[in-house]
Amino acid sequence: MLGTSFNIYARNKQYLVTCYTGKVRVLSPATNQSLDIESQQQASINRDGTMKLTSIENGMDEAPWMSHMFIFTGTPIQMVFDEIERQFDVSIKVVDDMEGLLYSGNFSRDLTVEEVLQMVSRSFALEYSYVNGVYVIQKK
């Protein structure tokens, strides 16, 4: 792996492998499918084991989380809220059906949880409140 830099993101049986320099081979154990990715490419492995190759559009040279940035592209809104919970050590309850809502955007870990929730909520005409230690998300 000399001269190769990459990042592996694993959450809820979904994996993203991003190659920043060099070349990485990604293997899906469920399907035994392999995919070679090169600099500025990303392989995603879904829960069913299928793989998808995409290009990184912003030309990053390191994993965004290393700079306290979190970037989402067409990400199911529940996964975004799950990540906010992890990053800010808070509880979030989504009370309305948000199936099919995909979020594209980014936020810095340097922001407050309220600032991040406001940014995400504004994208979908959602509102949030803080009730008994839990952030409650609902449609307006």
Image (cartoon, helix red, strand yellow):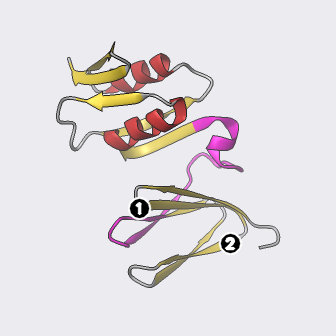
Picture quarter with the C terminus: top left
Picture quarter with the N terminus: bottom right
> Taking 25 as reference, is 113 above or below it?
above
Q: Which residue lies under the disc numbered 1?
A: 13
**Secondary structure type for disc 1:** loop
Query: Can you tell which quarter of the image residue 24 is in?
Result: bottom right
Residues at marks 2 and 1, CA–CA distance in whole angstroms: 23 Å
Residue 116 image point, x, y percent: 47, 23
**Does the magenta portion include 1?**
no
Q: Which residue lies under the disc numbered 2?
A: 23
Residue 7 image point, x, y percent: 63, 58
Quick one: which residue is furthest to the front in this view? 132
Answer few, some or many: residues within 10 Å of disc 1's Cα (few below 14, many 20 plus, some between 14 and 19): few
Say which residue appears at 26% left-offset and 39% top-offset: 101
Q: Amino acid at mark 2?
A: Lys
Q: Which residues are magenta?
A: 44-69
